[in-house]
Amino acid sequence: MSIVLLRVDERLIHGQVVVGWGEYTHMEQIAVVDDEISASPWEQELYCLGVPANVNAVFATVEEAKQAVPGWRDDPLRVTVLLRDCQSLERLAADGTLEGLEVNLGGIHSAPGRERVLPYLFLSEADRTSLQRVAEAGVTVTARDLPASKPVPLSHLIAGCQ
């Protein structure tokens, strides 16, 4: 399997992903799955400023990513897939597209309607519902900000434990 990291992080491409996770996973490609950014060459260009020269960056809508995931699984490149929110993840996981993979929740920040679950993770009821549906689609859901951190299982996230 060549998807080395599947991560929900509102910031998408940033230092923690590129340096912390990039060195840990030895990623060679970043796939940003986001309907809005995939339609904006200007935003894509901005995000690419944070991508190391030896790493490819691709941008896809959720629907495009559904078609691309089988190829990313078999790609000889080590692919990191990034999504901005739990609802996009749920849409991508529908129909078993991500079955057998593990998703890392790494940075969902405070906003109205969200409750603090971990220092770096705030979830709304809609987020919790989406994550439960993702798990029902055969995806392991954990939260972990950095590779050296201990993964926090979905059961703790849903319950709001810290």
Image: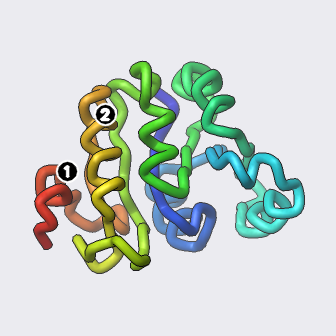
Picture quarter with the C terminus: bottom left
Q: Position of residue 25 (x, y in %)?
A: 47, 50
The kind of residue on which mark 2 rests is Val
Q: Which residue is mark 1?
A: 154
SS at mark 2?
loop
Horizontal side of 15 relative to 6 (left or right) equals right
* Towards the viewer: 94 or 55: 94
Answer above or below: position of 119 versus 60. Answer: below
Cβ–Cβ under 8 Å for marks 1 and 2: no
Give the image location of residue 52, x and y in percent: 72, 62
Looking at the image, residue 65 lies above or below residue 80: above
On screen, residue 65 above or below 58: above
Disc 1 or 2, which lies upstream in sequence?
2
| Residue 30 numbered mark, or none | none
Residue lying at 35% horizontally and 62% vertically, measured from the top left:
147
Q: Residue at x 43, y 31 (%)?
A: 93
Q: Which residue is mark 2?
A: 139
Residue 30 in view (yes/no): no
Query: Callout 1: 10 Å neighbours few (<14), some, many (20+)?
Result: some
**Occupied quadrant, residue 63:** top right
In-front residue for pair 148/124:
124
Looking at the picture, which amino acid does disc 1 mark? Leu
**Does residue 143 appear in this view?**
yes
Q: Element type at marker 1?
A: helix
Which residue occupies 58% across, 73% down? Answer: 15
Q: Check the image and report above or below for 24 versus 56.
A: below
Quick one: 102 or 53, which is closer to the camera?
Answer: 102
Residue 159 located left or right of residue 67:
left
